[in-house]
Image (cartoon, grey):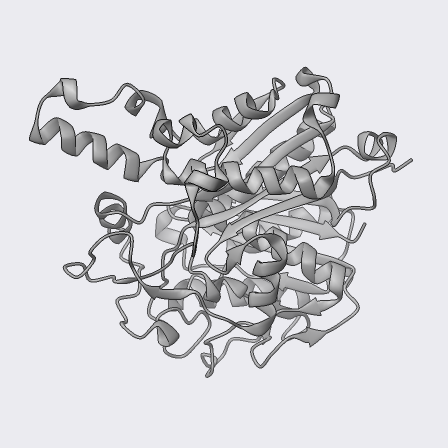
Amino acid sequence: MMTGAPVITGIGVTAPTGIGVEAHWAAVLAGKSAIGRIERFDAAGYPVRLAGEVPGFDAESAVRPRRLISQTDHWTHLALAAAEEALADAEVDPGALPEFEMAVVTSSSSGGTEFGQREMTALYQHEPSWVGAYQSIAWFYAATTGQLSIRHQMRGPCGVLACEQAGGLDALAQAKRLTGKGARLVLTGGTDASLCPYGLTAQLSTGKLSTAQDPARAYLPFDAEASGYVPGEGGAILVLESAASAGARGAGPGYGRVLGHAAGFDPPAETGRPRVLRRVAEQALRDARLTPGDIDVVFADAAGVPADDRAEAEAIAGIFGPSAVPVTAPKTLTGRLYGGGAPLDVATALLALRDGVVPPTIGTRRPAPGLDIDLVTEGPRQLPLRHALVLARGHGGFTSALVLGRP
């Protein structure tokens, strides 16, 4: 029977790089970028016209029961499909487990903006009677958590973390805590989908989005030409089980263990400084009972904003030493997915641990001077990987770090 840290036994992916774990992983290893022109709406009048969109997603075939399609937002559709894959991947039947010993904790940055915009447009163009009843819940940050809980009869402690990009790691940390308090299984991770006029306008307010028009040069973290980041949609849902529960049902070793976590807050006036990120990462290592020398790869937050990139590079170099650990940011293939970005990074890190390979950071060709990190850029790097550190920062100051280990 397994003992110790909780185990991730299933992964489901709905991302710009592909639908399904292996499709995503193949695209990552091939360095196949999914960033292109926004197609979900006409973005010709917007300064940002590029994004990472999930290709070929068909809610009619992916979402069950079908009535949920009209009752929920595209962001929830993506999570429902990813959750089905994750549960199948874990080979677990939720109906065979006590419903009050299963939980759901997801992350969300924007909620159901596309659904909300459609209903508010109906209100402004017509009258209140034109607004559907599901507007009251479909836009809400916790809608995905609620729908997953209902869909799979998971009636234990449920919640949502609204900490932008950092929320995905915080959700996994909360899931880990729940397994320590009696939950056998937690669906966790997150998705986001805010590629609509209302959603994109809200994102523009940060001033950190890239306005470049060349998809290959729009999102270049740690590069001398970095000018911001590209938004995206999608993410990953994971099945996290207590080691005892996974062992009792005869589950395999899983993808990896969640060993440690820490979170902090960096006031907006100080987000260009490494102080908080470094302390959070060091605390995550202490929580995992590891030293810097135990970490074999860092999955960077990779803001793509020069000051933020420099602060992250200084934090990493301060912990591990100059260029002492491989650093990567596969999110250059997808854009930043907000509430879904960190869960997708976790999924990618777990696959890296499984296969012993560090995926590359595609696009970054000329690292900015003075950044003392070993950024993997030329192609996949084969290495015997034991532990990975995943970093995430969210707009407004949210900061989080998660440590993963091989099964």
**Position of residue 383 measured from the top left corner of the image (x, y, whole percent):** 76, 72
Q: Nearer the viewer, residue 172 or 37?
A: 37
In the displayed image of the protein, which residue is found farthest to the right? 1
Q: Nearer the viewer, residue 187 or 261?
A: 187
Q: In this view, does 375 lie above or below 304?
A: below
Up-down relation of residue 407 to residue 215 (above or below): above
- Which residue is depicted at the point 57% across and 55% down? 345
Residue 175, quarter of the rendered image:
top right
What residue is shown at x 75% (from left), y 66% (from top)?
Answer: 356
Given residues 182 and 122, the one toward you in this image is: 122
Q: Is residue 28 at least partly visible in the picture?
A: yes
In the rendered image, residue 317, in percent from the top left (x then y), is placed at: 60, 68
Question: Which quadrant of the figure contains the N terminus?
Answer: top right
Task: Give the left or right position of residue 219, taking residue 98 as reference.
Answer: left
Q: Which of 217 and 195 is in front in this view?
A: 195
The residue drawn where x is 39% and y is 65% is 35
Q: Is residue 190 left or right of residue 193?
A: right
Q: Residue furthest front?
A: 61
Name the image quarter holding residue 110.
top left
Residue at the image position 45 percent from the left and 79 percent from the top: 368
Percent across and percent down for residue 196 are: 26, 47
Horizontal side, residue 24 vs residue 257: left or right: left
- Up-down relation of residue 360 to residue 353 (above or below): below
Residue 186 sits above or below residue 405 on the image: above
When asked about the image quadrant of residue 273, the answer is bottom left
